[in-house]
Image: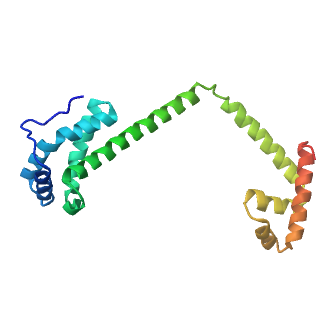
C-alpha cells in the first residue's frame, strides 16, 4: 500500500519536524501547513496498515492532524522526536478505530442473534404474571396481620430483618419466626411443595 504525500510535500529531517511542531505549539499556521505536508503521508500510511481501509485511514489521518494542531503545546522535545509523538497519536487513534469497529460488529451480531430468536407472547406473559400476583395477594390477605406485616416490610419494601424488627418494635428472633411461618403458609396456599 503506497503512502500518500500531500501536494508539495517534501522530506524533512527529524530536527526540522521537531522545530515545526514547537512552532505549531506557539500557534504558527505556516508551520502547521509545512508540518502537515511533511507528515500527513506517513501518518496516513500507518493508519492504512492498521485499519486496512483507505477511506477510514484518511479520516483517521485528518483526525490525527487536527489533534496535533490542538495538542501541540503538550509536546515536549526533550521527551522524544515530534514524528514519534505524532505517530504514537496516530497509532492510538487507528487502534481505537479498530476496537470501535469490532465492538460495533459484536453489538450488531448480538442484536441479529436475538432478533432471530422467536419472540414470546408478551400479552400471555403479562396475563400470567397478573394471575400469579393475584394468587399471591389472595394468599397474603389470608395471613394474620402479625404474619403479613413482616412479609410486606421485608419483601415489598425491601427492609432487612433488623429493620423490620425495629419498624415493628419486635425482637429480631420474633420477626424471623414470623417470616418463616408466613412463608410456609404462603407456600402451602400457593400449592408449592413444602
* Residue 172, horizontal then vertical, whole percent: 85, 71
Left or right, 168 with respect to 60, comes to: right
Left or right, 118 with respect to 186, comes to: left
Q: Nearer the viewer, residue 35 or 141?
A: 35
Q: Quadrant of residue 149?
A: bottom right
User: Residue visible at 82% across and 59% down?
Assistant: 151
User: Which color scheme is applied?
Assistant: rainbow
User: Residue visible at 86% across and 67% down?
Assistant: 175
Q: How many marks?
A: 0
Left or right, 52 with respect to 69, comes to: right
* Residue 184, horizontal then vertical, whole percent: 91, 53
Q: Is residue 49 above or below residue 187?
A: above
Q: Is residue 108 above or below residue 33?
A: above
User: Residue visible at 33% across and 47% down?
Assistant: 92
Left or right, 17 with respect to 95, comes to: left
* Residue 66, horizontal then vertical, whole percent: 21, 48
* Residue 154, horizontal then vertical, whole percent: 78, 61
Visible residue check, residue 52: yes
Q: Quadrant of residue 177?
A: bottom right
Visible residue check, residue 59: no
Viewport quadrant of the N terminus: top left
Q: Nearer the viewer, residue 92 or 194?
A: 92
Amino acid at each position: 500500500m503506497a503512502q500518500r504525500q500531500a501536494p508539495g510535500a517534501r522530506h524533512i529531517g527529524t530536527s526540522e519536524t521537531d522545530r515545526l511542531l514547537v512552532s505549531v505549539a506557539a500557534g504558527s499556521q505556516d508551520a502547521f501547513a509545512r508540518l502537515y505536508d511533511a507528515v500527513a503521508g506517513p501518518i496516513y500510511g500507518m493508519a492504512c496498515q492498521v485499519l486496512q481501509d483507505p477511506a477510514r485511514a484518511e479520516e483517521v489521518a485528518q483526525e490525527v492532524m487536527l489533534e496535533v494542531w490542538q495538542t501541540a503545546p503538550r509536546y515536549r522535545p526533550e521527551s522524544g522526536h515530534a514524528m514519534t509523538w505524532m505517530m504514537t497519536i496516530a497509532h492510538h487513534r487507528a487502534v481505537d478505530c479498530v476496537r470501535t469497529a469490532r465492538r460495533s460488529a459484536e453489538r450488531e451480531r448480538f442484536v441479529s442473534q436475538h432478533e432471530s430468536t422467536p419472540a414470546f407472547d408478551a400479552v400471555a406473559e403479562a396475563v400470567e404474571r397478573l394471575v400469579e400476583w393475584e394468587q399471591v395477594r389472595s394468599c397474603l390477605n389470608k395471613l394474620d396481620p402479625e404474619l403479613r406485616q413482616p412479609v410486606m416490610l421485608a419483601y415489598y419494601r425491601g427492609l432487612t430483618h433488623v429493620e423490620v424488627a425495629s419498624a415493628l418494635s419486635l425482637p429480631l428472633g420474633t420477626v424471623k419466626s414470623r417470616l418463616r411461618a408466613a412463608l410456609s403458609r404462603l407456600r402451602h396456599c400457593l400449592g408449592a411443595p413444602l
